[in-house]
Image (cartoon, helix red, strand yellow):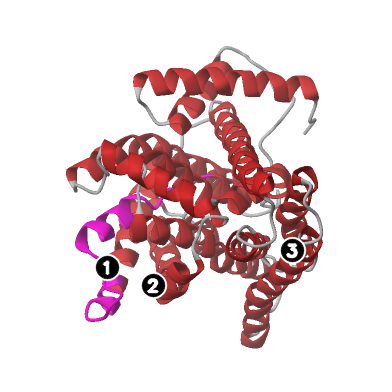
């Protein structure tokens, strides 16, 4: 990977033009980016920036998580936390298991490859989910459930993915080791996020310079992520925690008026850049994959991943049927179909060691599922929301935007 000013400028110019065209023709921005990337690759366009695990995790993912969590309200999160945790833990495990079984029996994959694919593709990707639902203007509890689940379920997938790699490499893993690693991934990520957010808020409280406030928020987003990863904890949970704390306890108290408005604009722009680069690079990489002999495993992968998502959402929703946390049937449908896969799955699959059995097939299947998510689920999300009458009317959306602006100020 070679990050140069020229290559970034070219990709951002392309992204801006795609954004204008996508708005004109009313298609999802992410779909337009991937399609543009594929076309550019077929036209022999060469970028010095390649889609890699390090690029996604260390550069592009932290601002997306931080920007999303800045506006998650603490009281709403705590109230819905039981639902979010059930989907982010039991849902991921159930989905991974069913996907692995399906790939083994229907595609003839070895159990090791099938299980590894199941766990890396099971977690819904916060990047894709947030981009789609933010564009659709989904309000209230539904948006919170979709966004929060997509952010929280990374911890389960990451731990399962790490355990599977250890097992495949022939190393012994005890129940205590798995439990200890799981606890540290979660608790360590939360702890680092709290410490980083606390330190940044302490510094921010002692300045009224909006530029310094923006700089410190950047340190919070990237510092929490990289520090947690350095200690083998969950970087996503760490940045998520830092973003929630700064958004709920920093913005209303520690930030100046100018710093508060600048922060919103700055992180919206940072998320736009990250989204643009991720989906353009997905398209550029996708065109390079050879699907000649992989069409059947790809079809099977798309089918079993979709069915496994349904098997996780609908039965687990029954657990809350007789409580105040009951999930409406329409919301269950959207949670099911909104379980998009994207950058997170690709970051994990691209980081697979070369010696992993069936690595090439796993990579191709993962890209196939991601492309299905972006094009099929992404393009049909708005019609589904409209059909279920969950898409807010234009006047309601304007009121919602005004309300959000009041809350942020």
- Which disc, if any, is residue 201? 3
| Depth check, front residue: 139 or 162 | 139
| Disc 3 versus disc 2: nearer the observer | 3
- Which disc, if any, is residue 227? none
| Depth check, front residue: 38 or 8 | 8
Q: Please identify the quarter of the rendering in which residue 224 is found.
A: bottom right
**Which residue bears the numbered disc 1?**
327
* Residue positioned most to the top: 43
| In the image, residue 36 above or below residue 350 | above
Comes first in the chain, label 1 or label 2: 2
Rounded to the nearest angstrom, the CA distance separating label 3 from label 2 is: 30 Å
Q: Please identify the quarter of the rendering in which residue 183 is found.
A: bottom right
Mark 2: secondary structure? helix
- The reply, left or right, for residue 93 in relation to residue 326 is right
- The reply, left or right, for residue 67 in relation to residue 393 is right
Percent of width and height locating residue 388? 19, 48
Mark 3: secondary structure? helix
Contact check, label 1 and label 2, Cβ < 8 Å: yes
Contact check, label 3 and label 2, Cβ < 8 Å: no
What are the residue bounds of the magenta stretch? 317-342
């Amino acid at each position: 990977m070679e990050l140069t000013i020229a290559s970034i400028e070219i990709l951002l110019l392309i992204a801006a033009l795609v954004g204008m065209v996508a708005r004109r023709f009313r298609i999802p921005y992410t779909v337009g980016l991937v399609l543009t990337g594929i076309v550019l690759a077929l036209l022999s366009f060469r970028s010095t920036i390649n889609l890699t695990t390090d690029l996604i995790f260390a550069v592009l993912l932290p601002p997306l998580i931080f920007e999303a969590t800045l506006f998650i309200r603490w009281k709403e999160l705590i109230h819905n936390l039981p639902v979010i945790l059930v989907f982010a833990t039991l849902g991921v495990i159930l989905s991974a298991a069913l996907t692995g079984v399906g790939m083994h029996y229907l595609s003839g994959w070895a159990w090791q490859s099938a299980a590894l694919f199941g766990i890396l593709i099971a977690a819904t990707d916060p990047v894709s989910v947030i981009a789609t639902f933010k564009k659709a203007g989904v309000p209230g509890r539904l948006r919170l459930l979709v966004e929060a689940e997509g952010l929280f379920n990374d911890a389960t997938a990451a731990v399962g993915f790490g355990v599977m790699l250890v097992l495949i490499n022939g190393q012994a893993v005890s129940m205590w080791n798995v439990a200890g690693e799981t606890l540290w991934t979660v608790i360590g990520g939360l702890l680092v996020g709290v410490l980083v957010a606390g330190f940044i808020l302490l510094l921010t409280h002692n300045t009224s310079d909006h530029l310094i406030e923006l700089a410190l928020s950047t340190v919070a987003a990237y510092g929490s992520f990289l520090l947690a990863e350095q200690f083998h904890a969950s970087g996503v949970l760490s940045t998520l925690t830092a973003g929630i704390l700064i958004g709920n306890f920093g913005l209303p108290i520690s930030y100046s008026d100018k710093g508060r408005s600048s922060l919103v604009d700055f992180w919206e722009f940072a998320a736009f850049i990250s989204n643009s680069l991720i989906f353009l690079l997905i398209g550029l990489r996708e065109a390079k994959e050879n699907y000649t002999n992989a069409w059947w495993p790809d079809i099977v992968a798309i089918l079993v991943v979709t069915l496994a998502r349904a098997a996780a959402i609908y039965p687990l929703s029954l657990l809350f049927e007789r409580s105040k946390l009951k999930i409406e049937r329409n919301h269950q449908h959207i949670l099911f179909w909104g379980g998009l896969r994207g950058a997170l799955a690709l970051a994990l699959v691209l980081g697979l060691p070369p010696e992993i059995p069936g690595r090439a097939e796993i990579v191709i299947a993962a890209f196939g599922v991601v492309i299905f998510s972006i094009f099929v689920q992404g393009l049909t999300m708005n019609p589904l929301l409209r059909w279920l009458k969950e898409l807010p009317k234009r006047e309601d959306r304007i009121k919602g935007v005004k309300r959000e602006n009041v809350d942020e100020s």
